[in-house]
Image: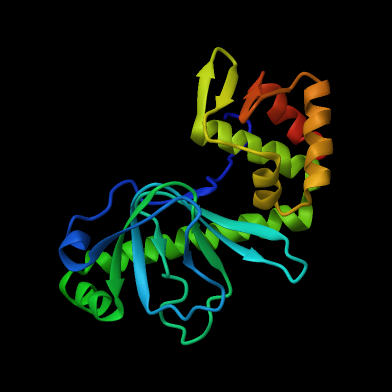
Amino acid sequence: MNTRDFSSPYLGPDKVPAFFEQIGNKIRYKKGEIIVSADDEMKDIYIILKGKAKQYAISKEGREKILFILEPGGMIGDLSISEKKETGFYVEAMESLELIKLTFKDLQEALYKYPEFNLYILSSLSKKAQNLVVQLEDNCFKDAETRVCEMLIKLAFYEGKMDTSSYTITFRTSQQFISDMVGINRITTVRIIKNLREMGLLDVKGSNYIINDISLLEMYAIKDC
């Protein structure tokens, strides 16, 4: 990753502060379960201990746009906890999920007793704001093919296994997932993936995406920049 600075599609500090477990309650969700719905009013905040969740919005036409992939240490509800209105987004478990749930009263107690919690929330909000700015710039200034290439590079960098110059993305990936991440329709993604395969930049074996030469894919991604 030496030609460009790609921000992570994943959000979560490296370590969950131990005091969270002393204040909140542990809860679990199975893969596919919804933690937050668009018409919910956030009354609690969640910190992920294990697993991944996706936070996304759905258009009137039913298209999904993934906003964040939340990892251990990531927070759910920090964007909406002070707003007394519907969230407008969904959060869904992508795999078995273990969370710490804090009520608003718990949150107030934590903010008072543990000043470092304030910095933890500010860090989470800052990362999400930066991530949204990057997505806005991508949507405004980059074509679909560039966005797909860059998303594959991000997945390889953060969820990949390197073998010489090739990367195998170990995270279970699909064309629909990539479409939802970059905000394009699946037909466009299928066409782009097919083109990358024909050029020898990418191989697909089941749910495994293999970038044959990541440097060449980086160069191709910035061809029009």
Where is residue 131? Give x, y as percent: 56, 56
Q: Residue at x 47, y 71 (%)?
A: 79
Seen as rendered, the residue at the extreme bottom is 84
Q: Residue at x 65, y 39 (%)?
A: 174
Relative horizontal placement of residue 171, taking residue 205 as reference (left or right):
left
Relative horizontal placement of residue 167, taking residue 73 as reference (left or right):
right
Relative horizontal placement of residue 159, taking residue 115 as reference (left or right):
right
Q: Quadrant of residue 221?
A: top right
Relative horizontal placement of residue 47, taking residue 203 as reference (left or right):
left
Q: Residue at x 30, y 66 (%)?
A: 101
Question: Relative to the observer, which residue lies in front, 213 or 183?
Answer: 183
Where is residue 11? Give x, y as percent: 46, 52
- The correct choice, above or below, for 148 with respect to 42 in the image is above
- The correct choice, above or below, for 186 with respect to 128 in the image is above
Where is residue 83? Give x, y as percent: 46, 83
Question: Relative to the observer, which residue lies in front, 207 or 170?
Answer: 207
- The correct choice, above or below, for 160 with respect to 38 in the image is above
Where is residue 176? Give x, y as percent: 69, 45
Q: Where is the C terminus found, in terms of image quarters?
A: top right
How was this image coloured? rainbow
Q: Quadrant of residue 1?
A: top right
Q: Residue at x 38, y 66 (%)?
A: 122
Q: How many marks?
A: 0
- The correct choice, above or below, for 131 with respect to 192 in the image is below
